[in-house]
Image (tube, helix red, strand yellow):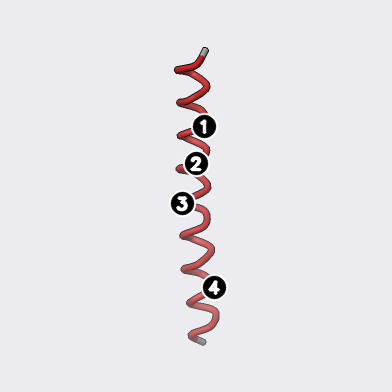
């Protein structure tokens, strides 16, 4: 089903964005401290 494929792609994108934000926040903490 295309809807399942869309949801899968959407979840993957959200996961990638979340990991990127996590990396950026951790790096910011390292640089600030």
- Against 3, is 12 above or below? above
Task: Decide which of tag 4 and tag 3 comes sooner along the chain.
Answer: 4
3D distance between C-alphas at marks 4 and 2: 21 Å
Task: Decide which of tag 2 and tag 3 comes sooner along the chain.
Answer: 3
| Image mark for residue 21 | 2
Q: Residue 15, percent across and down?
A: 52, 53
Task: Decide which of tag 3 and tag 1 comes sooner along the chain.
Answer: 3
| Image mark for residue 7 | 4
Q: Residue furthest top?
A: 33
Q: Residue 26, percent across and down?
A: 51, 28
Badge nearest the viewer, 4 or 2: 2
Residue matched to label 3: 16
Badge nearest the viewer, 3 or 1: 1
3D distance between C-alphas at marks 2 and 1: 6 Å
3D distance between C-alphas at marks 3 and 1: 14 Å
| Image mark for residue 25 | 1
> Crowding at label 1, few (<14), some or many (≥20) Cα neighbours within 10 Å?
few
């Amino acid at each position: 089903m295309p809807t399942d494929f869309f949801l899968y792609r959407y979840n993957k994108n959200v996961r990638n964005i979340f990991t990127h934000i996590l990396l950026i926040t951790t790096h910011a903490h390292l640089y600030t401290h």
